[in-house]
Amino acid sequence: MAISLCFSPLTSTPKHHPRIPLYKPINPIITLTRPKIVNPNLKTIKCIPENSQNLAAVPAKPRWENWLSIAASLFPVYVTAGGVVACLKPSTFSWFVNSGPTSYSLALWFIMLAMGLTLEIKELLNLFLQRPLSILFGCAAQYTIMPALGMILSKILGLPPSISVGLILLACCPGGTASNVVTLIAQGDVPLSIVMTACTTIAAVLLTPSLTKFLAGTYVPVDAIKLSISTLQVVVAPILLGSYMQHKFPKAVKSFTPFAPLLAVIATSLVSSSIFSENVGRLRSSLVGMSFSSDLPLLSRAQNVLASEFGLIVVSVASLHFAGFFVG
C-alpha cells in the first residue's frame, strides 16, 4: 500500500489592520469666519456680560460740585489772605478773638462735624479691626520722626535755648485738625487721619512731657484730664454725631456733603487768621527791634532779618513743617 502526499504552498491574502489614533479630539475644530457686513451704515454693538457688576457706569459729578472742590483746594490761598488781613488790620478778627476760647472750640467742633458727615461709624470700627498696624505706625511716626527733626534742626541752625525748647515742644505735639482738613481736601484716608489725631492727642498726656524733657531738658506739664475732655469734645463727639446723622438722615446729609470740605477749609482759615491777629503786636515789636540801615544792600538786610530772633523762629518753624510734610 502506497501513500502519496501532495504539498501545496500556503498562500494568504494580506490583511489591512486599522490604525488606532493616539488621541481623539474632543470637539471638532470649527473655523469661524467673520461675516461680511453688507450694510456699511450698521454700527457695532458691544455687549456687557449680565453678571458684571463692576462695569457699571459712574455718573459724572455736576459742574457746581467740581467748582466747590476747586474752591476747597485753595486752602493755602485763604490762609495767606487771612494772614495778610490780620497783619494789616488785626481788628477784623476781634469779634472772633474776643469770644474765645468758646469760639475756637466751636469752630474746631464744626470742622470735625463736617468731616464726620462724610464717614460711617462702621468705617472707623473696621479701621481698628482690620488695620491696627497702620494706626500704630502712624502714631509711632508722629512721636519719633517729628521730635527727631525738631532736635536736629535746633542743632543745625544753632538756635538759642529758648527758641530750641519751643521748636522741640512744637515737634512733640500731636497732630491737629488742620491735618484732617488737608486729608479731606486731598481725598486721602480721612478715617485713618481722624483716628490718628484722636490717638496721638490722648497719647500726648504722657509722650509730650516725656519727650520734651528727654530732648530739650525741660519738663512741660500737661493736664491729662483737661486734654482728655477736650479730645472727646472737639474730636470724638462731632465725628460720632456726624456719622450718626449720615446713618439717620442720608438724604439731607448727601445734599450737604459737597459743601463740607469748603466749609471746613473756611473755618480752619478763620481760626488760623484769628490766632495770627492775636500775635501781630508781638510780631511788630520784633520787627521794630531790628535796625535797618539804608546804606546796606538788600541782600545784607535779608541776612540781618534771618539772623535776628524773628528770622530764626520763622526759618526753624518753616523748616520743621517742610521736613515733616516731605517725610510724610
Image (spheres, rainbow, N blue to C red):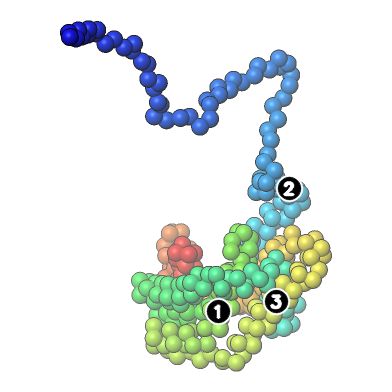
* Amino acid type, callout 1: Cys
Taking the image as drawn, is residue 181 in sight?
yes
Please tell me which residue is depicted at 55% across the width and 22% down the height of the picture: 31
Percent x, y for residue 229? Answer: 64, 88
Earlier sequence position, callout 1 versus callout 2 = 2
Q: Quadrant of residue 122?
A: bottom right
User: Gap between marks 3 and 2, in whole Å?
Assistant: 29 Å
User: Gap between marks 1 and 2, in whole Å?
Assistant: 37 Å
In depth, the one of 156 and 198 nearer the eye is: 198
Task: Tell whether label 1 touches label 3 (CB within 8 Å).
Answer: no
Please name the residue that numbered disc 3 is placed on: 240
Please tell me which residue is depicted at 44% across the width and 87% down the height of the picture: 210
What is the crowding at mark 3: few (fewer than 14 residues within 10 Å), some, or many (at least 20)?
some
Image position of 29 with respect to 215: above or below: above
Earlier sequence position, callout 3 versus callout 2 = 2
What is the crowding at mark 1: few (fewer than 14 residues within 10 Å), some, or many (at least 20)?
some
Please tell me which residue is depicted at 68% across the width and 17% down the height of the picture: 37
Image position of 126 with respect to 63: above or below: below
In depth, the one of 181 and 28 nearer the eye is: 28
Q: Residue extending furthest front?
A: 1
* Amino acid type, callout 3: Leu
Q: Quadrant of the N terminus?
A: top left
Q: Secondary structure at mark 3?
A: helix
Image position of 130 with respect to 7: above or below: below
User: Gap between marks 3 and 1, in whole Å?
Assistant: 15 Å
* Amino acid type, callout 2: Pro
Q: Is residue 53 left or right of residue 166?
A: right
